[in-house]
């Protein structure tokens, strides 16, 4: 068995060690967070003439190059709302619901579809 003095010594040393580890981990996290926020602020703009490289034998007009410069994550907005696909998705989702709840969902979906407006185009006429 440990004497009272030995127990107090072990308790104090383990507490000091835990405090030391906590302060080291906290400092490390603060440094990492600082590096993360600093590195994310350095976004370099690419030169517009180097964004699109034509590897084909065909000449690209300015509208084609403008669309390609928008990048791989660019998606063209639809010209109209895909009503049929929305209705099919709603019907598939409500087929297991009770009839009265399914009808309520149908009515709400129909109301939303009637009020919906197509999104503004994100391409110019030439593009």
Image (cartoon, rainbow, N blue to C red):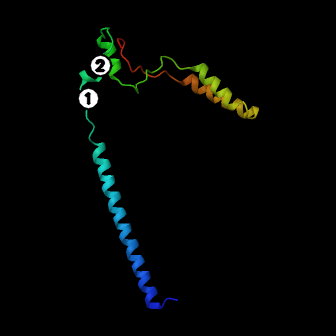
Front in this rendered view, residue 89 or 118: 89
Work out whether mark 1 precedes mark 2 in sequence or the reverse, and give the earlier one: 1
Of the pair 25 and 120, the residue shown nearer to us: 25
Q: In terms of secondary structure, where does tag 2 sit?
A: loop
Provide the secondary structure element on which disc 1 rests: loop
User: On the picture, is 31 further left or further right than 73?
Assistant: left
Nearer to us: label 1 or label 2? 2
Q: State whether residue 8 is above or below residue 42.
A: below
Compared to residue 50, the image places residue 57 above or below, namely above
Q: Which mark is residue 92?
A: none
Q: Residue at x 63, y 30 (%)?
A: 108
Q: Position of residue 7 (x, y in %)?
A: 46, 86
* Residue contact between numbered discs 1 and 2, judged by CB atoms under 8 Å: no
**In the current view of this chain or complex, which residue is farthest to the front?**
1
Quadrant for the C terminus, please.
Answer: top left
Count of numbered badges drawn on the protein: 2
- Residue 63, percent from left and from top: 32, 13
Q: Considering only vertical position in the picture, is 113 above or below 38?
A: above
Q: Residue furthest right?
A: 99
Residue 107, quarter of picture:
top right
Mark 1 nearby-residue class (10 Å; few <14, some 14–19, many ≥20): few
Mark 2 neighbour density, 10 Å: few (under 14) some (14–19) many (20 or more): few
Circle 1 residue:
46
Q: In this figure, which residue is indicated by the disc labeled 2?
A: 53
Query: Which residue is rendered at x = 43% and y = 23% of the image?
Result: 75
Percent position (x, y) of residue 93? 67, 31
Residue that appears at 75% across and 35% down? 98
Towards the viewer: 121 or 58: 58
Residue at the spot 57% in from the left edge and 22% down from the top edge: 114
4 sits left or right of 71 in the view: right
Left or right, residue 91 beside residue 54: right
């Amino acid at each position: 068995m440990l004497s009272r003095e030995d127990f107090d010594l072990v308790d104090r040393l383990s507490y000091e060690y835990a405090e030391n580890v906590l302060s080291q981990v906290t400092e490390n996290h603060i440094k990492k967070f600082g590096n993360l926020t600093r590195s994310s602020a350095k976004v370099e703009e690419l030169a517009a003439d180097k964004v699109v490289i034509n590897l084909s034998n065909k000449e690209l007009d300015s509208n084609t190059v403008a669309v390609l410069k928008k990048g791989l994550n660019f998606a063209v907005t639809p010209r109209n709302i895909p009503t049929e696909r929305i209705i099919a998705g709603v019907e598939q989702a409500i087929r297991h619901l009770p009839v009265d709840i399914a009808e309520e969902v149908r009515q709400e979906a129909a109301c939303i579809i009637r009020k919906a407006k197509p999104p503004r185009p994100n391409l110019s006429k030439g593009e």
